[in-house]
Image (cartoon, rainbow, N blue to C red):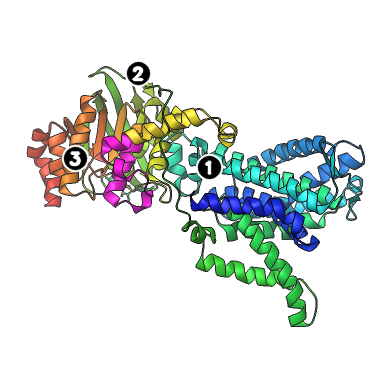
Amino acid sequence: MNRTRLVLGVFLAFILTAPLVLPEFHVTLLNYIGLYSIVALGLVLLTGVGGLTSFGQAAFVGMGAYATAYLSTVHGWSPWVTLLIGLALTFAVSLFLGFITLRLSGHYLPLGTIAWGISLYFLFGNMTFLGGYTGISSLPPINFFGLTLDSGREFNYLIWAFALLALLSMNNLLDSRSGRAIRALKGGGLMAESFGVDTARMKIIIFVHAALLASLSGWLYAHLLRFVNPTPFSINSGIEYLFMAVVGGAASVWGAVVGAGILTILKQWLQNILPKLLGQSGNFEMIVFGVLLVLLLQRAREGIMPLAVRFFPAPKKLLAPVSQVLQRRIRPAAGEALLDVIGARKAFGGLVAVNDLSFTMRSGEILGLIGPNGAGKSTVFNLITGVLPASGGEVHFRGERIDRLSARAIIPRGLARTFQQVHLLPTMSVLENVAIGAHLRGRKGVVSAALRLERAEEATLLAEAAQQLERVGLGASMHEQAGSLALGQQRILEIARALCADPVLLLLDEPAAGLRYQEKRALAELLRGLKAEGMSILLVEHDMEFVMQLVDRLVVMDFGEKLAEGLPREIQTNPAVLEAYLGSVN
Ligand code: ADP
Ligand code: MG
């Protein structure tokens, strides 16, 4: 039995026995920790994992609480029905708010969440049918298969059952195809889009998910207290929820419970001790919280879970047996026209990085794109793969014009790339990083992931990632963190990731940079092998020896323009090239 299971077992045993043996006061604390954990869990997903800060979660808690308070008292509906209605309402409102707020970038997003957090609070307070600032009282207790949960001790089981289900499903979600896409949002958005992830949609999904958890917590809260008023749903609580998520950190979903636990107990303790110390009453704990938050952000940005997680090494992921086969693309015949760049142009303000560049590629070819630093090679890659919009010219791929398409629309057509500056998720395993490349070869979404209904597909995706890692020679490192690899290896990882997309054309931006001699030879061997299988490769590379022995043809760029084009031996003796390029290197 591993340590993680042991701690989980102890925790479960505690939750099961605590309400029976603890004094009333402690049971109440435990109830609150459970309620807050559910909200904080949503924020771990939204803010910790997804990088989207929300101060407004308390308003969604209020939505769940008020929906059930109003409908179960005024209309006398069953709390189980009003739970569903509250969730549906929250779903609709958060979807709408998500659409308007998530477009805001940088500091505007948190400001936006503060704005609607405050608005919803005043809305609750000013609605006379919701009881104004006095609120609604005498909510019915929850009835569970004939059992009336009208004491805090009984309610504890309901709260923690929901909290554990939420934790479990979140854990499932993060460990899936959609989960990898969500984890790429913070720091890997561009890369994820390049592999077909709809990052805008993923942001909405985690926003709605977090709101639904908050609403669920509100429903539980309302029936625990059997009374609601606007106070607990103010922006102050929103800040506290965010604080809990930050304290716990995003390293593990259990950070939500740890954060909620620490803050709840600390707040209780400070509320007792501070007035005694200071000799007067007031909300001094908020000041202490503020100071602690600043300290935490300076000293332990990732929250306190990473410290704890170190004691619980994740068990090595065993690759599950595969029962499906991944579809492969139909490849063009060798020699067929593949890529056609016609008069491509890109200007950054006054700087023309690519100027009227034209070249073509045939299927099965390795074409080298070379030129001095700053010649515009990477910009050409960005134009072809849709990462940057072109200022002029056209790009055609297999007879289809693609220069107006986004990166996300281009990848399914069979172009996959690596980046000159590696784009990977350093704390995610090598295997999972590579599996992002296969994103579009899976179909299953967040709901099946949370319910673990996508295991067959997931096994297939991971097996594909493992196979591509073996192919590029990184099989032995697949369970390591991607960030722990040497830079040269990280570039090789990117090749495996691109191969996972089952490309027709592979675009490699300086893949040999940072590799040792033997590794370069292995890479050349790999690329030759890929070519033999019919892969077409567009290669940007600085190492001349490496390029010359590998490519069929070369295009030489200088100052954004095409300087020469031809076979390696022609280029090696071309006077213009020797002067502009080789001359400047030697
Ligand atoms: P290479 O890959 O051949 O070294 P790049 O395509 O990276 O060259 O850069 C070509 C020129 O365009 C350089 O002068 C570079 O500074 C400029 N450049 C590249 N990307 C940008 C950008 N996003 N914004 C402004 N200038 C850029
Ligand atoms: Mg470059």
Which residue is tagged 3?
522
The rendered magenta stretch, by its main secondary structure, is classed as helix
* On screen, residue 550 above or below 254: above
**Which dot marks residue 151?**
none
Number of residues whose C-alpha sits closer than 10 Å to that of mark 1, classed few (under 14), some (14–19) or many (20 or more):
many
Q: If you read the primary sequence from the N terminus, does the residue marked by circle 3 or circle 1 appear first?
A: 1
Q: Say which mark, if any, is on residue 330.
A: 2
Numbered-mark total? 3
| Residue ID at (51%, 62%) | 301
Three-letter amino acid code of the residue under disc 2:
Ile
Residue at image mark 1 = 174
In the image, residue 355 sits, relative to residue 397, either above or below, namely: below
At 48% across and 41% down in the image, what residue appears?
180
Q: Nearer the viewer, residue 430 or 318?
A: 318
Q: Residues within 10 Å of mark 2 (few under 14, many from 20)?
A: few
Q: Residues within 10 Å of mark 3 (few under 14, many from 20)?
A: some
- Identify which amino acid the numbered label 3 is placed on: Ala
Report helix, strand or loop for mark 3.
helix
Say what amino acid the circle numbered 1 marks.
Answer: Leu
Nearer to me, 487 or 132:
487
Provide the residue span drawn in magenta: 468-497
Q: Is residue 249 visible?
A: yes
Which secondary structure, mark 1? helix
How far is mark 2 from mark 3, CA to CA? 28 Å
Q: CA distance from mark 3 to mark 1?
A: 34 Å
